[in-house]
Image: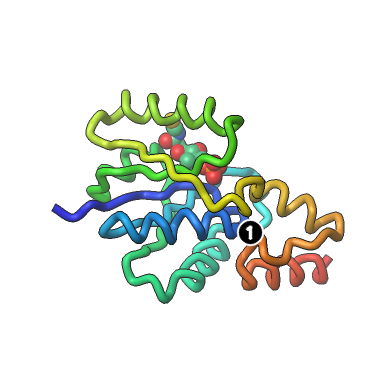
Amino acid sequence: MPTLAVYPGSFDPLTNGHVDIITRGARIFDRIIVAILINAEKAPLFGVGERLEIATEVFTDLPNVEVDTFDGLLVDYAERRRAQVIVRGLRAVSDFEFEFQMALMNRRLNGKIETVFMMPAEQYSYISSRLIKEVFALGGRVHGLVPDMVEERLRQKVNKR
Ligand code: PNS
């Protein structure tokens, strides 16, 4: 049976750390669905439609990567999509505690779905969407840390203000 994985997140915005994990995931799973959570934050910088557009564009050349949105419980979405695996990225030890809680809660909610942790390349191990937004908003350089398309859209948002 083909192995289908879901890689869930807010992706506000997509970073090169996410891209790295998705690319690795696409090499080991038959199919990986990038699942963007709807309404994760009350005031996201990028709307869900924009985030969907960005990820779809970034992964056009990877045929086994699909981009979708979801709301409600992640395990219910994974079950509906018939995915056997949830992929989460682990950067530093600081990520571990919350990820461990989520993995075990998700297992309790649906024992058939396995969480698999993957490590990004070390040059991305300190990046988060939150830091990207903060650094960019304060005039710092984020080049090389996010896809070019994200950098461009961040610039447009700042120019619009
Ligand atoms: O990018 P993020 O914010 O770290 O992603 C968090 C996400 C989307 C994986 C998590 O908030 C989630 O799964 N939300 C869906 C609701 C749910 O299932 N909550 C219970 C998780 S144990």
Give the farthest residue toward the left: 1
Residue drawn at x 52%, y 69% is: 53
Could you say where residue 143 lies in the image, as x and y percent from the top left? 72, 66
Of the pair 154 and 1, the residue shown nearer to us: 1
Up-down relation of residue 125 to residue 96 (above or below):
below
Of the pair 7 and 142, the residue shown nearer to us: 142
Query: In the rendered view, how is the structure colored?
Result: rainbow
Residue drawn at x 82%, y 71% is: 159
The image quarter containing residue 28 is: bottom left
Under circle 1, the secondary element is loop
Could you say where residue 122 lies in the image, as x and y percent from the top left? 59, 50
Q: Dot 1, how many residues are within 10 Å of its Cα: few (below 14), some (14-19), or many (20+)? A: some
Could you say where residue 106 lies in the image, as x and y percent from the top left? 36, 30
The image quarter containing residue 73 is: top left
Give the farthest residue toward the front: 122
Up-down relation of residue 1 to residue 23 (above or below):
above
Does mark 1 have its CB less than 8 Å from ligand 1? no
Apparent side of residue 132 relative to residue 80 in the rendered image (left or right):
right
Up-down relation of residue 143 to residue 88 (above or below):
below
Label 1 amino acid?
Phe
Query: Which quadrant would the C terminus be assigned to in this image?
Result: bottom right
Of the pair 115 and 144, the residue shown nearer to us: 144
Residue tagged 1: 46
Residue drawn at x 38%, y 71% is: 62
